Image (spheres, rainbow, N blue to C red):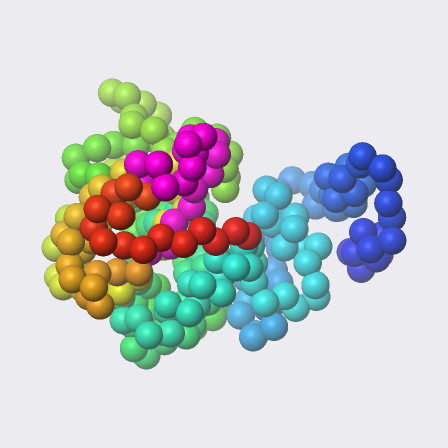
Amino acid sequence: MIEALRKIELVLELPGVEIREHVTGPVLDAMYPGEPLVTKVLDDGTSFTARYTSKIIRDFVLAAERPDHVWEPQTTKAALHFAKTANTVIVGGAYIGDHAIPMARVMKGKGVVHCFEPSPNADLLELNAKANGLENVLINRVGLWSNDETQLALVGDDSHAYPVIAGPGQKGAFEAVSIDGYGARQKLEKVDFILLDIEGGELEALTGSQRYLSQPPGQAPAILFEVHRSYTDWTNGLAATPIVQLLARHGYKIFALRD
């Protein structure tokens, strides 16, 4: 049935209609009621298990039989490029490991991927690390923020949940840490690569990593972060956004990468 849906997407054209959103997607959703677990293997043999709860996993299931990525192919390629020469990687918003697991695979035996995922998806991240025999994935079930004193909460569902500062006694609140504070506790003199996809929390996370951003070129981390219009106003151009200005002040050269 899944193969039939893939073929339909190749041949069916309805003016003004997004075929996946209105035809094949709803059919697939009906095939996976109750948010079950699904498992799929990438072309390099990496196994991924995910809960069928989001567009990300819908697209993953409908992808080629053995795709080369889970989600965001260009981000995956860029992340793997940096991971190949990295010893220490930090991933904020690690989700189920869609980027962290492939990076840990190429870093196996020489480096550690420090993951931050406060949502229940951390359980699937742990499952996927174990399924692929990766002991170099360190899972932190906390959020990343600009300091070590703030408590956060998530608003929204699954992969689209975004962090807000939690109110007193707010249900679902969780601890947050800064990259600088975490690095000091872990004795990380150098971080080679930082990957952030935390639905609008990227600026706060980088604000909390001044120690590493201030290191000289060649020692300061490479950084890959999401800018999403739902959380960042780039009406005046990406160069005018606070997160780009922050990195520019630290001497970074910024490139736009579009998935």
208 over 63 or under it: above or below = above
Residue 72, percent from left and from top = 54, 54
Return the residue nearer the eye: 70 or 245: 245
Range of magenta residues:
223-243
Left or right: where does residue 144 sit relative to residue 93?
Answer: left
Q: Residue at x 31, y 23 (%)?
A: 170
Residue 16 falls inside the magenta stretch:
no
Q: Residue at x 48, y 53 (%)?
A: 257
Q: Quadrant of residue 86?
A: bottom left
Residue 162, percent from left and from top = 42, 34
Left or right: where does residue 182 sit relative to residue 225?
Answer: left
Q: Residue at x 48, y 57 (%)?
A: 75
Seen as rendered, the residue at the extreme top is 168
Residue 231 falls inside the magenta stretch:
yes
Residue 204, percent from left and from top = 27, 38
Q: How would you classify the magenta stretch by its main secondary structure? A: loop
77 over 246 or under it: above or below = below
The quarter of the picture where the N terminus appears is: bottom right
Total labels: the figure holds 0
163 over 135 or under it: above or below = above
Q: Quadrant of residue 151?
A: top left
Q: Residue at x 32, y 79 (%)?
A: 109
Residue 219, percent from left and from top = 19, 66
Left or right: where does residue 51 sit relative to residue 79?
Answer: right
Residue 49 visible in the picture? no
Residue 35 visible in the picture? yes
